[in-house]
């Protein structure tokens, strides 16, 4: 009887434990998931473009994106999208197909989506690139530099 009670308590505790584990990381989405989520409920969007070789991207992953305050704020106030800017995947978003045209001619080319969303006039594309969009998917802020935990918190709190 006691053993059955212990097993029952374990099954009741597992959902609580798995829920708490989910809150220790940012709930990153891809663009297809973002499109579905925006259709269900408009919400601010945080888009983070990175590359595997980007030292500052890795540093933000180790610091800012592991900060509990940032994780809570991102998961509650934003749809957070994380994309490798050098991805060779074809992505369908808002009825359009996007892909990495440069991968055909250059090693490590940049995908169309980051080029479209994070390009700047008269400046080359650079990483890390962070975009903040409002509930209507209008651009509110873009950052193209390493953000400390404090600066990241300030960025997502101001928007």
Image (spheres, rainbow, N blue to C red):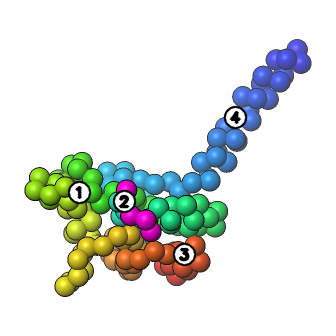
Classed neighbour count for the residue bearing mark 1: other residues with Cα under 10 Å, few (<14), some (14–19), many (≥20): some
Percent x, y of residue 112: 20, 62
Identify the disc placed on residue 14.
Answer: 4
- Residue 83 visible in the shown view: no
Determine the secondary structure under disc 4.
Answer: helix
As drawn, which residue projects farthest toward the right?
2
Q: Mark 2 or mark 3, which has the lower sequence index?
A: 2
Task: Using the numbered discs, state the Cα–Cα distance from disc 3 to disc 4 in whole angstroms.
Answer: 35 Å
- Location of mark 3 (residue): 148
Disc with the residue nearer the chain's start (4 vs 1): 4
Of the numbered discs 2 and 4, the one sitting upstream in the chain is 4
Indicate whether residue 69 is drawn in magenta.
no
Mark 1 or mark 2, which has the lower sequence index?
Answer: 2
| Circle count | 4
Q: Report the span colored magenta.
A: 52-57
According to the picture, the residue beneath numbered tag 2 turns out to be 53
Q: Viewer-nearest of labels 3 and 4?
A: 3
Q: Which mark is residue 154?
A: none
Residues tagged 2 and 4 counted as in contact (Cβ below 8 A): no
Q: What residue is rendered at 44% in x and 68% in y?
A: 56
The answer to whether the residue labelled 2 contacts the one labelled 3, judged by CB atoms less than 8 Å apart, is no
Q: Please report whichever mark, 3 or 4, sits nearer to the chain's N-terminal start.
A: 4
Is 55 part of what is drawn in magenta? yes
Label 2 sits on a secondary structure element that is loop
Residue 8 drawn above or below residue 71: above
Discs 4/1, front: 1
Q: Give the labeled residue for mark 1.
A: 108
Distance from disc 3 to disc 1, alpha carbons, whole Å, reads 27 Å
């Amino acid at each position: 009887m006691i053993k059955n009670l212990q097993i029952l308590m374990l099954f009741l505790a597992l959902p609580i434990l798995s829920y708490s584990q989910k809150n220790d990381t940012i709930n990153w989405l891809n663009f297809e998931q973002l499109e579905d989520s925006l259709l269900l409920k408009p919400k601010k969007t945080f888009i983070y473009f990175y590359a595997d070789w980007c030292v500052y991207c890795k540093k933000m992953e180790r610091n800012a994106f592991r900060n509990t305050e940032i994780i809570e704020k991102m998961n509650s106030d934003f749809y957070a999208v994380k994309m490798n800017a050098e991805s060779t995947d074809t992505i369908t978003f808002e009825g359009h197909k996007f892909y990495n045209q440069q991968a055909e001619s250059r090693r490590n080319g940049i995908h169309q989506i980051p080029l479209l969303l994070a390009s700047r006039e008269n400046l080359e594309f650079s990483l890390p690139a962070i975009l903040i969009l409002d509930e209507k998917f209008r651009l509110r802020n873009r950052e193209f530099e390493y953000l400390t935990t404090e600066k990241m918190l300030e960025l997502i709190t101001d928007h």
